[in-house]
Image (cartoon, coloured by chain):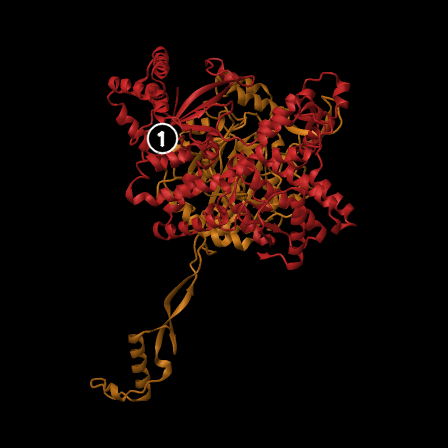
Amino acid sequence: MELIDQHTKRIMEGCKVRARDAGLRFGDETLEYIVTNRDLLELSPKVMIPTLYDYWVHDVEVLREKGKYELYPANPYETVINTRPAISFYNDNNPDWLNVMIFYHVLAHIDFFQNNLYYRHTWDYDFAGQALSDKRAIAKLRSEKGRWVDYIIEFARAIDNLVGYHETLARYHRPAPSRRDRRIDYYFDHFLQDLRNVSTTEYLKEIERFNQSRREHGAGGEDAFFLAVEKKYPEFPALYRRHCDHPPAGRQDLMEYLCAHSSVLKREEHHWMQEVVQIVRQTALFFQPQIRTKIMNEGWASYWHETLFLQDERIRGHEIDFARVNAGVTALPRIGINPYALGMRLFYAIEEGADRGRLDFDYQRLTDARQREDYDRATARGRRHIFQVRANHCDFTFINTFLDQDFVNRHRLFVAGRRLNSQKMVWEFYVKSRRLADYRQMILDSLYHPPHITVGPETAPDKDLFLIHHFEGKPLVAEYIPAVLLGMEYLWGHAVHLDTSEPIFVAEAAAQTSRESPAPSGITWRRVRYTMKARRLSKSNL
Amino acid sequence: MDRDPTFIDRAVKRGTLGEAAAERMRAEIGDHRPHCLTPPMPAADRRPRPPADLYSPGDLQVLQAMSAGALPPAACLQSLDELLERDRRREQDGFPRKIRVGRLVKPGRRGKQKVVVVPTTVEEKLIHDTLQRPDEEGPGGGGAGPGEEGEVVGEAPVRPDQEGGGAGPGQGQDAAHEVESNAYDLGRILTEKFQLPNLKEKGKKRSLTQYTYELTDRHRGFGQFLDKKATLRKIVESNIHLGRLPDPANIDPSGFLIAPADRVYRILSREKDYESQAVVFFLRDYSGSMTGRPTELVVTQHVLIYSWLLFQYERQVETRFILHDTEAREVQDFYTYYNTRVAGGTQVASAFRLVNEIVAAENLAADYNIYVFHGTDGDDWDTEGAEALPAIDTMLGYASRVGITIVEHGGETGGTTVERYLTASGLLKRRSDLLRLDVMPQEADEPRLIEGIRRLISGRLDPQPAAAAAGA
């Protein structure tokens, strides 16, 4: 890998000036590298992070047929990575005009990385540097502990798709604590509800008593109230003090929970394992936002490379070359979904809609088709609006909010169905539906969505670990369960149970009773518990 | 060979035949397709495919047409030993093995077999599964463009291996991900696991072992190790000739002359161990009922055995290939054996009889250790084994090992026809040193196949390990 030459770098700097003028915001420094196919061989298993830790699975062809994106949320062929400075990768024989187009695309990605709130947790540090120190830490541990380091990496990676990404983000966007007396919050939110378990009537009575005390004593009402409380519950002050000293950590994801409570990981001589688990967790967290903003991110970058390229006076004469490449990137495929095409068109549609004032309530309540068509308030707010959209949305909210029937009609989108033609031995693709609801559902269904798995309440330290898969209409891949639970048992130190749901197809389901209703036709669901004990897996119905 | 179809009904009535198996047999009777070679797979299809889903396209591919392509063979070979060593360690440490050896053989004609070794693995995580059954109507994703609802806008071929020809598993399809190697590598992986059992000394025309180097030869003048006793004897001899030893009763060694050629050394020399030779028969049922998975599994297993033989015995083991439906025929190379399409009915006995004939005609039993590996789905029109059992019995008279692999069709109970009559005959128990049976489900994977080979050729009969069966 070597840096691009000065000539190309100058072009990049020119692109930055133009992109900034258009309103994009990104850090000043960027690094551009030339990569060969040989470099890519090493880079792609490490999801383009040159400094990612070594792990033997990276040397092996990994089978990804099953649930490939669920297993590997990061795209192995990304051209720019979210580091500080951002690093991007280029073929060494790109002509200048093509580089200009790619530079704009890259700059829009960087702008997205550095402004979209779903990337908030990656803003404060350079992942390349972090990864390098992690890599060194793991290399050092490996020289001490040998292959056991790889086992821990393996077991930690088995659950790294369950990291609490949204919980992590939530920690950033917490409203500042109010100046109200925290004692009240503790008394009403935790003490009465969690510890005393009072009935609703009693709870309401307490609130009433508090209000009355406020009315009677004014500013001193609170203290008067708590004097009474302390008389009733002498243990309250001590409990409150303990609560202040050790505030609950908030919701922990599985890996945090293991680090905090596992009898194996907490042992003095096993602290290095915690370190490994934390490294895997941090790395997984870093990769989370990319896959949740694929449509937006690629759409945003395509929108800007198209817009800025056509305005750039340096590449006059290459419009046709550009048109050919650009069409390859952003054409809507006859069958299939192209995130570049879909995202870019949606951004154009949102901009146009905002320009004409169609996002306002006045427009929304119009029912007359002709009036809707002619509606134009000429607000010129479009550009500003899409910048807001790029800062605040992820794919789910983006699709859910902005995809509408007008858009589906305009681009003649449809949901395709597939059926077998047994005479010709081909799969036939046909137009299944052109309705917005179906199209939107199809997109939402194909979005990345890891299972929601939490630690059950029966779990206690030094006892069995209970995991609960919160059922969302899809089963887990059964053949992967044993290996994951094996690793969990190793990390936890005691038996591990996983409650999940399993489909029963209707032929065999006749005798079974259905427990959960939302099922495709012909399928009922059964709740089962997998247990991994002493490295043996068993399964029982619940 | 056409037979009166009523024998099926009689067998069902007697209870020797399951209804599902009977149904397959009836289908086979009406099956008059020819056994042709499956056409070779077209060279890797390089047409750009439309991005099927949201997440597969990446910027490097889409914008710059770059992807990593195939690993150079050298890069992979370096790590292969290390990976396998790691895998062995896993077992010692009490964790299941994780490396699988994928994509096995690309048979070519006239000894041009290419064996492709790709170590693969899966990182297991808890992820959502899809509920779709593969043969049914399913979602096709999104699309854009003209067309009424219900209109067909495109088609794609169903993958050829789903059609169930004789084509083996996964050959040639995505060349981009494969590493070309040779049989040596695959053999190296397998050799640590197997040994041909019951190898007897016969014929001694060929060497089956590699050369060994030993310090057994003597050499005058130079060598690795001075043989003092022999040297002294030589010196004495020379000096007698020279007349320098007049009185044998009173020898004065200080007066000896020592010629350079008197020094006798032991010298490192190549020793060729002539050993037993072997011929291996591969038998494959290519009847109509073998469509799809059974054939895939049988040929894959035979590929594994074949590759291992190539490596372990350095092409010294002779291999013969026999295909059978109701009649058996010998084919000249592995390529034909591997690729011939399934069709027609089933007479297992025909293959065994052909082996017996070949062995008798060529008098192989005198000079060779004979091994027979047979793969079938366990259906046999000869429901009682009336013809097959005597043929097997004859075979056991000369064979060092007969290994029969049965791939069960899904959802059947009570065992297949072949399994039933073999068990009933008691041969499996009586001749357990010579006859082995391995029954695997249709869903078996590669580790299960290797486990099966181990079972077929292991020296002593292990009690069928339940753990291995469950792990498959």
Pick the front one: A435 or B416:
A435
Quadrant holding the C terminus of chain B: top left
Q: Look at label 1 and name its amino acid.
A: Pro
Which quarter of the figure has residue B453? top left
Whether residue B100 can be seen here: yes
Pick the front one: B51 or A481:
B51
> Where residue B406 sits in the image (x, y, percent)?
49, 32
Q: Which chain is disc 1 placed on? A: A
> Where residue A184 sits in the image (x, y, percent)?
36, 23
Which quarter of the figure has residue A468? top left
Q: Which chain is orange?
A: B
Pick the front one: B393 or A240:
A240
> Where residue B213 sits in the image (x, y, percent)?
40, 64
Whether residue B164 can be seen here: no
Q: Residues within 10 Å of mark 1 (few under 14, many from 20)?
A: few
Residue found farthest to the top: A201
- Secondary element type, mark 1: loop
Pick the front one: B355 or B113:
B113
Q: Which residue is mark 1?
A: A248
* Relative horizontal placement of residue B232, taking residue A1 as reference (left or right): left
Quadrant holding the N terminus of chain B: top right
* Relative horizontal placement of residue A329, taking residue A441 as reference (left or right): right
Residue for point 31% across, 87% down: B257
* Relative horizontal placement of residue B118, taking residue B210 as reference (left or right): right
> In the picture shown, does residue B187 fall above or below B231?
above
Chain A: colour as depicted: red
